[in-house]
Image: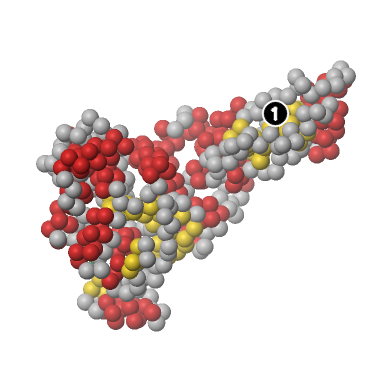
Amino acid sequence: MFGRRPAKAVELLADGRHRDEIKSLNVTAAVIDVSFEVQPGEIFVVMGLSGSGKSTLIRMLNGLLPHTSGTVEIEGTDITKLGKSDLRKLRSEKVSMVFQHFALFPHRSVLDNAAYGLEVRGVARAERDAKAREALAMVGLDGWEHKVPGQLSGGMQQRVGLARALAADTDIILMDEAFSALDPLIRRDMQSQLLELQESLGKTIIFITHDLNEAMRLGHRICVLRDGRVAQIGTAEEILNDPANDYVANFIEDVDRTRVLTASSVMEDPIPVVDPGQGPRAALRTMRDNQTQSAFVVRRDRKLVGGVNETAIGEAVRDSVKELDGLVDSLERVHPDTPVADMFAQAAESSYPLAVVDDEERLVGVIPRGTLLAALATPGGNDDQAHEDAPRVETAESGKTADTAGTADTGAEPQSEAAQPQPDPGGDAPATEGSRQ
Ligand SMILES: Nc1ncnc2c1ncn2[C@@H]1O[C@H](COP(=O)(O)OP(=O)(O)OP(=O)(O)O)[C@@H](O)[C@H]1O
Ligand SMILES: [Mg+2]
């Protein structure tokens, strides 16, 4: 709660009053009844429109903002009970933060900026420089150590911000709209890099964004905030396929589903399958029984051999061919985790459905082209929508990455940066944080 009589406001809210009703108390209820747990190594995304309470929430997680009510536990310690110096220690050793507008010191070198967290912690020069160099290398900035931020592009400056958090080597990293100031292509690049770093370093990341596509791409789980309250918490697929309410449903209308849905969520059972030991006649019968024009050739250990089609098999039967050998076509394969967006080019290359195979090359599902297109329709949307959507995505995809990424990222931006309120005087810059100490 922001304002003079926060306790009274909490009381009224607990009684079920709406946050507009407590405005008369001159209190802004920024975060109300928000409860969640984040697992170690998880990327937990908080998303919502401007003013929904994201920044307030994330700043309570490291004690930058005092809470009015409730608890924030980190590894079992309720940080709302910590004093100032313990909170400072927490911020320097356990929880680092990456800000939207880089928050770099303009007159310090890139190296010193990256080493800032360690410097605050009192780490000796040689050691902190070594760690900062290492972190800068992780984000692809080796060779830039002795420049100053002004000599770097926006994307590079953002990387310095990330390097600072990595150099501090805290288990938890909070990122408040860290990529929002970047243009869409660089932003996508940064997202990929973050995913890679998270995978190799296993950091726990709380990531704030108002871009749904970014949320869906990065988040293991996503918390959608509305007016300070939780509208839904779930995985991207849960939110897409089963929005908790109309608000969330409206929100996800414009999402690029092809980037969120993966092969495993759209695949169908592989039917029919034939054994490589069977002859063309048996294969033909299997196809006729199932009323399909093709079949998957799969060994007993479920490993995929390939596909056969009715025309070739029919001719083979007429020519009295006894073996399937030589009649089996190789199939386009995708992994269960492949995003739908990355499958269109492959799907276009083959007359067969795409084969979904696991790490052992076992066939776990298939994706007919029609299924791929249907996956683009919103749940409850009619078929026309699917067909309207499909060619557009396919065209973008044939140009591969750049255009698709561009449209995807800008398309779902619910609010422009310009529409956001001015940064509050509490300030993001480390200089301000320093001056509080
Ligand atoms: N220091 C403050 N004093 C008073 N009210 C504040 C303060 N900071 C935020 N608020 C109010 O709290 C509410 C939530 O703001 P917050 O900054 O958390 O939103 P946000 O979701 O981060 O928005 P944005 O996407 O614009 O950054 C808003 O109504 C805002 O006006
Ligand atoms: Mg904010």
State whether residue 188 is above or below residue 98: above
Image quadrant where residue 376 sits? top right
Q: Which residue is at the front of the view, 400 or 63?
A: 63
Whether residue 229 is situated above or below residue 173 in the rendered picture = below
Q: Measuring from the top left, give residue 403's x and y in whole percent.
A: 42, 34
Residue at image position (84%, 26%) is: 279
Q: Nearer the viewer, residue 371 or 196?
A: 196
The crowding category of the residue bearing disc 1, from other C-alpha atoms within 10 Å (few below 14, some 14 to 19, many at least 20), is: many
Asked which quadrant contains residue 309, the reply is top right
Task: Residue 378 in the image: state x and y as whole percent.
Answer: 56, 50
Q: Residue at x 46, y 51 (%)?
A: 220
In which quadrant is the N terminus drawn? bottom left
Q: Secondary structure at mark 1?
A: strand
Colouring method of the image: secondary structure
Residue 268 shows in the view? yes
Q: Can residue 284 be seen at all in this image of the molecule?
A: no
| Residue occupying image coordinates x 86% and y 27% | 281
**Is 71 on the left or on the right of 107, as rendered?**
right
Q: Position of residue 188 (x, y in %)?
A: 38, 39
Which residue is disc 1 drawn over? 306
Give amino acid for label 1. Gly
Q: Residue at x 17, y 60 (%)?
A: 425
Q: Quadrant of the C terminus?
A: bottom left
Task: Give the tally of numbered discs.
Answer: 1
Instruction: Please provide percent x and percent y for residue 219.
Output: 44, 51
- Reply above or below: 46 against 342: below
Between 38 and 104, the one nearer to me in the picture? 38
